[in-house]
Image: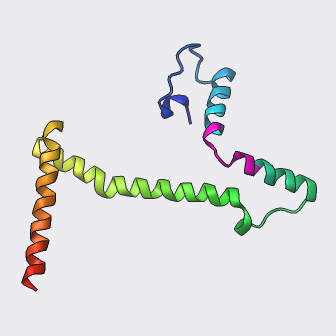
Amino acid sequence: MTAEQFGIPFNELNPTEDSSLRKLYDTLVFKAQDKFHHLKCVQQEAFKNTGDELAESEDAYLAELRYHGQDGALIEDFATEHTDPLIESISKVGLKIEGVDVHLHALVTQDALIEFKQRAAH
């Protein structure tokens, strides 16, 4: 992860990508976003003191990482299944950004009308 990926400009010192200052900065940004970094440290300290490694099913830090990984996968799936096709359809129709809301409203209204008619028929 780099600072730019989080929308944080890093132009003041203009370090190169492989400079130690850049690596330190990126590490700090990454760790600042890791809310469970302290939990990981506590778990590591407990392991050092006892020598007993946590079972995978009891590792809260690992569970948190997996949860965020699953969230990331869900977000990516949503983008692939819904957002990307929507963007493609808007592009095919040739809409400008100003007309997208009207187009989407029309689509939702059309779907709602079809569903209403189907329910009314039963």
Left or right: where 105 falls relative to 51: left
The answer to whether residue 119 is visible is yes
Q: Residue at x 55, y 13 (%)?
A: 12
* Dominant secondary structure of the residues highlighted in magenta in the image: helix
Task: Tell me if residue 36 is in the magenta stretch.
Answer: yes
Q: Quadrant of the C terminus?
A: bottom left
Residue furthest bottom in the image: 122
Q: Quadrant of the N terminus?
A: top right
Q: Toward the viewer: 77 or 17? A: 77
**Residue 29 image offset from top left, x and y in percent:** 61, 33
Q: Residue at x 89, y 52 (%)?
A: 48
Q: Is residue 99 above or below residue 74?
A: above
Left or right: where 38 falls relative to 84: right
Q: Residue at x 80, y 54 (%)?
A: 43
Q: Residue at x 35, y 52 (%)?
A: 79
**Residue 105 image offset from top left, x and y in percent:** 14, 53
**Residue 10 image offset from top left, x and y in percent:** 54, 21
Q: Toward the viewer: 120 or 13? A: 120
Task: Tell me if residue 5 is in the magenta stretch.
Answer: no
The answer to whether residue 96 is visible is no
Report the magenta residues as a range.
32-40
Q: Is residue 39 above or below residue 2?
A: below
Coloring applied to the structure: rainbow
Q: Is residue 77 above or below residue 10?
A: below
Residue 57, quarter of the rendered image: bottom right
**Residue 76 image offset from top left, x and y in percent:** 41, 53
